[in-house]
Image: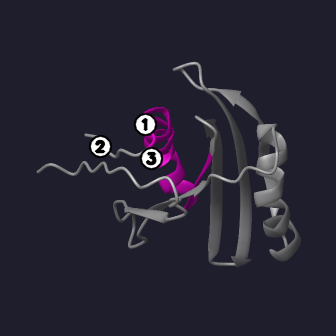
Amino acid sequence: MDNRFKFDLPREWQDQTVYYFKGPDIDGTGHQIMLTLDRNLQHEEIGQFARQKTDPIVRNLGGLEVLKDEDVTLENGNPVYEFICKWVPSDELTVIKVFIFVFYGGTGFSFSCDFSRKSHKMLGGQLRKIVESLLPGTYEEIE
């Protein structure tokens, strides 16, 4: 099955879409990657861009514990910013929230995915591989 798409928008149009990629169920919990594009960057540094996106989350989710908040260089050499936090909304539920921010070709890309502890260990590497395969305007399913 071919899951790729590519199209060109006229100059007057800007893609501000939120992309949603459904992932596997682990222990009855579904996973999805959300990808948003920001073509109107208000910051020149990726850390400032990441902070603009994550500060409201930190302010609004009580009991949030930041696990990682730093610049990272991926295996392909692309600099990204990773923000990972743990949120415990109830005694029965722990959520690992992962955000990866990328600047590429004048566009800001924000990836996010929620995991359980177990699924983060199982699927976290897949999220990173998806980010590493980023080509603006295209999507190819990772095998």
Above or below: residue 40 compared with residue 31: above
Q: Are marks 1 and 2 in contact (CB under 8 Å)?
A: yes
Q: Is residue 86 left or right of residue 136?
A: right
- The residue positioned 45% from the left and 41% from the top of the image is 136
Name the residue that disc number 2 marks. Answer: 140
Front-most of 8 and 65?
A: 8
Q: Which mark is residue 135?
A: 1
Q: Are marks 1 and 3 in contact (CB under 8 Å)?
A: no
Q: Is residue 97 left or right of residue 51?
A: left
Give the SS element for disc 1: loop
Q: Is residue 13 magenta?
A: no
Name the residue that disc number 3 marks. Answer: 122
How far apart are the two marked residues, 1 and 2, measured between alpha carbons?
Answer: 9 Å
Residue type pointed to by label 1: Leu
Residue type pointed to by label 2: Glu
x%, y% of residue 34?
51, 61
Above or below: residue 92 compared with residue 134: below
Q: Is residue 139 left or right of residue 65?
A: left
Front-most of 89 and 31?
A: 31
Which quarter of the figure has residue 92? bottom right
How far apart are the two marked residues, 3 and 2, measured between alpha carbons?
Answer: 21 Å
x%, y% of residue 60?
83, 76
Which range of residues does the magenta coloring cover?
Answer: 108-136
Residue at the far left: name it.
Answer: 1
- The residue positioned 48% from the left and 55% from the top of the image is 119
